[in-house]
Image: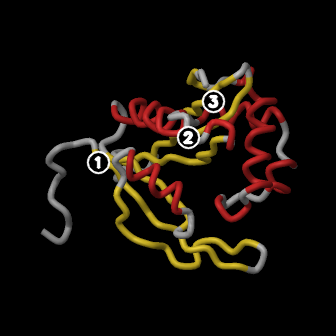
Amino acid sequence: MDYSIRMLTAADVAAYRALRHEALVNHPDAYASSAESFAARGDDDLAALLGQMAFFGVFAEGTLGGIVAFGQTKGEREQHRGWLYQVYVQQRLRGTGASLALIETAVAHARSRVIQLHLMVGAHNTPAIGLYEKAGFKTYGTDPRCLLVNGRYIDEHMMVRFFDEAPGKTENE
């Protein structure tokens, strides 16, 4: 299947809304937001969100089929870190290479802005963990009971990808 990837803009709000809502409905244990709280957000709010962070979308057959967002930590002492959020690719695009290409597009964008990129993923989500490992991410810890979804606790693995070859000394060195 042919696909293309590009940065989303305010003109993509309707497509973004539909795909993000689909992700939250179909995979409620994969995200901190609920479908109900997301549905209550207005188009102006979502357009502002698309402008605040870098959102990338994969398009196939003329429709948005996957998203990922990059956000940079704003704290004075954390500006070197970025985060991937809201990763979702529709079933029709899984196994086509689109998921990895989407992640790598966000990684390429982040590389010129931060020296390390973080994400969190459900400890039970083996396919996503494999995708992130293929993209160069490594697990560095687990946040137990990170989410509470429908009465069930979800542990989240914390993963990181370093861009610099020789990271600075850590506090423990």
Q: Is residue 147 left or right of residue 100?
A: right
**Residue at mark 1 to residue at mark 2: CA–CA distance:** 26 Å
Residue 142 falls in which quadrant of the image?
bottom left
Please tell me which of labels 2 and 3 falls first in the chain: 3
Please state if 5 lies on the left or on the right of 167 as rendered. right
Quadrant where the image shows the C terminus: bottom left
User: Looking at the picture, which amino acid does disc 3 mark?
Assistant: Gly
Query: Disc 1 designates what residue?
Result: 162
Q: Is residue 23 above or below residue 108?
A: below
Residue 118 at x, y percent in the picture: 42, 52
In this rendering, the answer to whether 103 lies above or below 148 is above
139 w.r.t. 162: above or below: below
Q: Position of residue 141 (x, y in %)?
A: 39, 70
Write down the residue under mark 2: 95
Q: Nearer the viewer, residue 121 or 93?
A: 93
Q: Which residue occupies 56% across, 48% down? A: 85
